[in-house]
Image: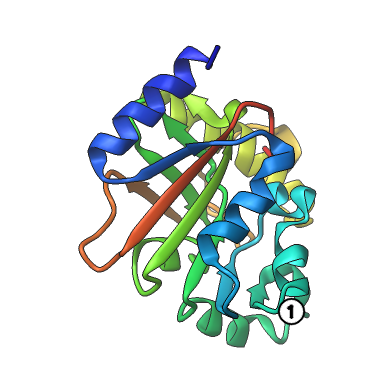
Amino acid sequence: MMDEKISRLCAKAKLRGFIPHVAEKAQVNALIGSLIGDEPKVVGSGGSVTLHDLGTLFELSAKGHKVYSYDTVSDEERPTLYQRAAKADWFISSANAVTTSGDIVNIDGTANRVAPLIFGVPDVIYVIGVNKIADTLDEAIERVRNHACPLNARKLNKNTPCAITGKSSMRNSADCICNVTTIVHHPTRLQDQVHLIIVPEDLGY
């Protein structure tokens, strides 16, 4: 039986214009491959623990797609990569949180992930573990600020208060990675397809 939160999220997301899917962890990459198709495409992605753990971008690259990902280049090459990823045919990402009503919440430092998710790339795929589903928008934002962001700051070796305390202080910091918050309520008019792949297992943070 499908988890009640996942069932509610899928129903609400469909009403909002998203295309929801439910897939087990082992099925995600095959589903993404079928959505993108066999013809070589340009695929962009921001940094994502979820996609890294699933090996998604590696599989797409092995199938002949041109993949632009944060994790594949040096710091010096990243500005160029960000521009290319923002003009891709498809953009794949996870989300920091999503509500059962279908609001998708992300917080970024450079906005290289959130910008293509909302403008410039016609087809988007989110891969979201059940651990990222929150009942309300306030709970979703709280989850991002006090769970995902501190862990990400530590992963990136940032000298921020949250990396030390594990809690958001929203204080000014040169290393701050909480510079842009986006809440996506619906696909935009310039987007063709926005897929939500909901995985009934914990993925990423």
Give above or below for 94 relative to 164.
Answer: below
Q: Nearer the viewer, residue 204 or 60?
A: 60
Q: Quadrant of residue 92?
A: bottom right
Question: Which three-letter amino acid code belongs to the residue tagged 1?
Answer: Asp
Q: Residues within 10 Å of mark 1 (few under 14, many from 20)?
A: few
Quadrant in the picture for residue 37: bottom right
**Residue identifier under label 1:** 75
What color scheme is it? rainbow
Q: Name the spot of residue 12 as percent of width and height, x first.
A: 30, 29
Q: Residue at x 60, y 88 (%)?
A: 80
Count of marks overlaid on the render: 1
165 and 67: which is toward the camera: 67
Give the side of residue 135 with respect to residue 148, left or right. left
Residue 110 seen:
no
Q: Who's the residue at 54% across and 77% down the image? A: 85
**Above or below, 125 relative to 76:** above
Q: Position of residue 104 (x, y in %)?
A: 40, 42
Above or below residue 69? Residue 161 is above
Horizontal arrangement in the rendering, residue 170 relative to residue 25 (left or right): left
Q: Position of residue 165 (x, y in %)?
A: 71, 33
Q: Quadrant of the C terminus?
A: top right
Q: Residue at x 38, y 54 (%)?
A: 194
For image coordinates 66% across by 60% down, the residue present is: 47
Say what secondary structure mark 1 lies in: loop
Q: Considering depth in this image, is 86 or 66 the residue closer to the camera? A: 66
Q: Quadrant of the N terminus?
A: top right
Give the image location of residue 100, x and y in percent: 39, 25
Q: Is residue 116 visible?
A: yes
Q: Residue furthest left?
A: 189
Judge from the rendering whether residue 115 lies leftward or rightward of residue 14; answer left or right.
right
